[in-house]
Image: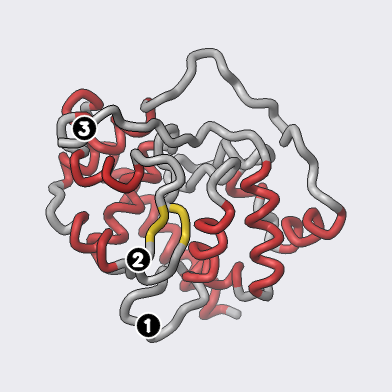
Amino acid sequence: MNKLITTIFAVVVSCVTASSLAQEIKGDAKAGEAKNAMCIGCHGISGYQATFPQIYKVPMISGQGAPYIVAALNAYKKGDRKHPTMRSISATLSDQDIADLAAYYEGHGVVADAALPAAPAKMPSAEVQALLNKANCASCHGANFSKPIDPSYPKLAGQHADFLFVALKAYKAENNAVVGRGNAIMGGMVKLYTNDELKLMSNYLASIPGELKVVPQSSFR
């Protein structure tokens, strides 16, 4: 137990440090718009599906929090998240590039004064609520799953269900060269669930209103 507490503490300190460093680099949304050519080919197409290493709709990133996007891109860059395409793309990005892209996507397609209710508009079934309570998901991702307590955590509400399911399963993966996410806290959480239970939660989270969206691009460059 003490070893687990020490590991979790180390991860939290690392996340806080990374978040603090990221905040030192101010992102420029306008500059990010000029740097997103590698992003729009997947994230700017409604319904676009990744086909390797698994098939699923690529995540909606317009409206996602900038600190989370920074954290995610850095995780791909360092190899903490194993995805060959995202690893190769993130490797080409400087810290300033990452900050600029994050600033751009945080405000991309956001509608002013379109505040979400404090609680989800659609409440879960008793079964799903029990699953969400098991790992106390709302304590980190917010009661409406669109207002995380730490900006480096992702908004989940309205995200594609198949992506959420694949992402959650990735925290369980071990010794896989192309699939996996290294995060001690999430790794411990997802192991509380079967894959069928993860799918139930993913389907619910995808069904509730959120701030995430795909903003189709009029042209590619």
Q: Residue 16 carries which label?
A: none
Identify the residue at image location x=25%, y=37%: 101
Residue occupied by mark 3: 32
139 versus 23 height, above or below: below
Identify the residue at image location x=67%, y=43%: 207
Q: Quadrant of the C terminus?
A: top left
Residue occupied by mark 2: 81
Residue occupied by mark 1: 176
Q: Say what amino acid the circle numbered 2 marks.
A: Arg
Q: Position of residue 211 (x, y in %)?
A: 53, 32
Label 1's element? loop
Label 3's element? helix
Check if mark 1's residue and mark 2's residue have beta carbons within 8 Å. no
User: From this viewpoint, which residue is outermost toward the bottom?
Assistant: 175
Q: Say what amino acid the circle numbered 3 marks.
A: Gly
User: From this viewpoint, which residue is outermost toward the top?
Assistant: 113
Left or right of 71: which side holds 78?
left
Work out whether residue 203 or residue 174 is closer to the camera in this orientation and state it. 203
Q: How far apart are marks 1 and 2 (CA)?
A: 11 Å
